[in-house]
Amino acid sequence: MSILTSIRWRTILSLAIVLSIGLLYSHYRHSVWWLNQEVGGIFYEIFWCLLAFLFIPTRWAVWQIPLWVCLITCLLEFMQLWNPPSLNWVRSFWWGRMLIGNAFTWADFPYYFIGSGLGWLWLRLIFWGARLK
C-alpha cells in the first residue's frame, strides 16, 4: 500500500508540474509562432498520461496509457476536420479549444508522438522510482 501511495503522490506532484508548465507555455507568446502552437501538444500528451496513471498506477498501465493517449489524441486531431454545430459550440469556449482543439494540422502529430514517448518515460520513472524505495 505504501508503494501505491508513493506512486500516487509522485503522480499528483508531476501533474501539478506539467499542468503549470503547460498553462504558462500556452500564454507565452515571445517565441516563434509554430513553437507556441504545436509544442503544447507535448505537455497535453504528458498531462493525459499522468492523469490516467493517477487512477491506474500499475506496471501494465505504464505501457498501455501512453499508447491509448496517443491514439485518442490523434483521433481528436482528425475530429477537428468535422464541424457540426455542437462541436463548434464546445470549441467556442477556452476549455473546449484546450481539450479538443479547433484547427487540424499535420504538424501536431510528431509532437503527439514525442509527448506520448516522454509520458511513457515519466510514468516509468514514477513507477520504478517508487518501487526502489
Image (cartoon, rainbow, N blue to C red):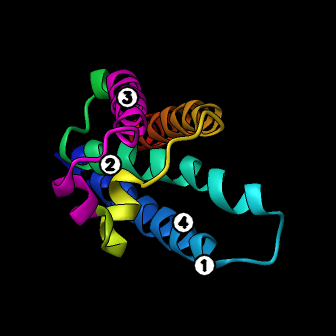
Q: Determine the CA span between mark 1 and mark 3.
A: 30 Å
Q: Nearer the viewer, mark 4 or mark 1?
A: 1
> Which percent across, then down, holds residue 88?
27, 59
Disc with the residue nearer the chain's start (1 vs 2):
2
What element does badge 4 sit on? helix
Q: How many numbered marks have been drawn onto this rendered protein structure?
A: 4
Q: Quadrant of residue 118?
A: top right
Q: Does 104 appear above or below 128?
A: below
Point out the stretch of residues depicted in magenta.
62-90
What element does badge 1 sit on? helix
Q: Determine the CA span between mark 2 and mark 3.
A: 12 Å
Q: Does 44 appear above or below 65?
A: below
Three-letter amino acid code at disc 3?
Val
Q: Residues within 10 Å of mark 4 (few under 14, many from 20)?
A: many
Three-letter amino acid code at disc 2?
Ile
What element does badge 2 sit on? helix
Q: Nearer the viewer, mark 2 or mark 3?
A: 3
Q: Nearer the viewer, mark 3 or mark 4?
A: 4
Along the line of sight, the residue nearer the viewer: 27 or 3: 27
> Which percent across, then down, holds residue 79?
34, 37
Disc with the residue nearer the chain's start (4 vs 1):
4
Residue under circle 4? 22
Residue ID at (44%, 38%): 123
Q: In the picture provided, is 33 more to the left or to the right than 81? A: right
Residue under circle 3? 62
Q: Determine the CA span between mark 2 and mark 4.
A: 22 Å
Three-letter amino acid code at disc 4?
Gly
Residue under circle 2? 7
